[in-house]
Image: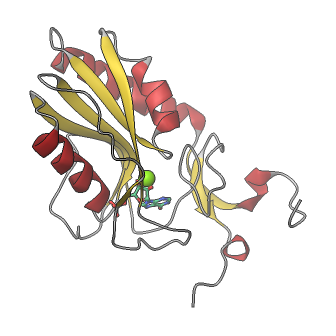
């Protein structure tokens, strides 16, 4: 069972966004997307694993016929600092020829993940359009110049977990977004 831990919520030093704020933010985003994509052939492509909770809640706020797909990548390989390379876990790309694509990810940080995925979809899938939506956007200098078309909350340069976001594969199921206590982060030096 690993370390004795008690409740997972006790591992957070600070909660940035609780369930009510997340719900409100996603409802507003869903309303904008519903208006913007009325009459179009929309496919939502979620970035796994982090984007799944956001996907599940956002699509239920979009009142349009749409299709779902996903793409699995990794850029962290375990720590709290991005490795700088985006690894695609599968060679198959979504079948979105002629469709309007909205790529969903949990968070925009260096921009490498979103730009790698959007670039491949644009170059290899012949979509009608490709845009992006993220729940969180870190206010940091991007390694790659990309901004999301739909962005929920802006945050500072700190490592967050919960609501899909993980640390070493855990905490994705926390219903809130917060910052881990130092004692739960393994030393990376
Ligand atoms: P980027 O490629 O640097 O923009 O990073 C985006 C990806 O890194 C996201 O899809 C997340 O999986 C991960 N990531 C970035 N920041 C955080 C964080 O604070 N907590 C957990 N995962 C993060
Ligand atoms: Mg991710």
Q: Is residue 21 visible?
A: yes
Number of numbered markers: 0
Q: Is residue 187 above or below residue 67?
A: below
Q: Residue at x 73, y 76 (%)?
A: 183
Task: Left or right? Give the position of 127 relative to 3.
Answer: left
Task: Left or right? Give the position of 137 relative to 50.
Answer: left
Image location (x, y in percent) of residue 36: 17, 20
Q: Nearer the viewer, residue 15 or 85?
A: 85
The N terminus sits in image quarter: bottom right
Q: Is residue 24 visible?
A: no
Query: Residue 167: which quarter of the image?
Result: bottom right
- Looking at the image, which residue sits at the far front? 91
Q: Residue at x 29, y 39 (%)?
A: 93
Image location (x, y in percent) of residue 42: 23, 19
Task: Left or right? Give the position of 99 relative to 30.
Answer: left
Q: Residue at x 46, y 44 (%)?
A: 48
The C terminus sits in image quarter: bottom right
The color scheme shown is: secondary structure
Task: Left or right? Give the position of 130 relative to 32.
Answer: left
Q: Nearer the viewer, residue 127 or 115?
A: 127
Q: Is residue 159 above or below residue 72?
A: below
Q: Residue at x 30, y 63 (%)?
A: 139
Q: Nearer the viewer, residue 87 or 166?
A: 87
Q: Is residue 180 above or below residue 47?
A: below
Q: Is residue 17 above or below residue 139?
A: above
Image location (x, y in percent) of residue 73: 41, 53
Query: Residue 74: which quarter of the image?
Result: bottom left
């Amino acid at each position: 069972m690993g370390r004795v831990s008690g409740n997972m919520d006790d591992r957070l030093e600070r909660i940035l966004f609780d369930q009510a704020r997340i719900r409100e933010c996603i409802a507003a985003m869903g309303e904008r997307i519903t208006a913007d994509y009325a009459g179009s052939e929309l496919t939502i492509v979620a970035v796994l694993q982090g984007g799944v909770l956001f996907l599940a809640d956002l699509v239920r706020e979009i009142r349009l016929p749409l299709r779902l797909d996903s793409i699995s990548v990794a850029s962290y390989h375990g720590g709290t600092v991005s490795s700088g390379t985006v690894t695609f876990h599968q060679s198959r790309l979504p079948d979105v020829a002629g469709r309007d694509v909205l790529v969903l990810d949990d968070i925009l940080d260096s921009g490498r993940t979103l730009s790698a995925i959007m670039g491949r979809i644009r170059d290899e899938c012949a979509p009608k359009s490709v845009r992006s939506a993220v729940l969180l956007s870190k206010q940091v200098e991007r390694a790659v110049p990309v901004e999301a078309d739909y962005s929920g909350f802006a945050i500072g340069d700190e490592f967050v977990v919960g609501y899909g976001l993980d640390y070493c594969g855990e905490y994705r199921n926390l219903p809130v977004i917060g910052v881990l206590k130092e004692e739960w982060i393994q030393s990376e030096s």
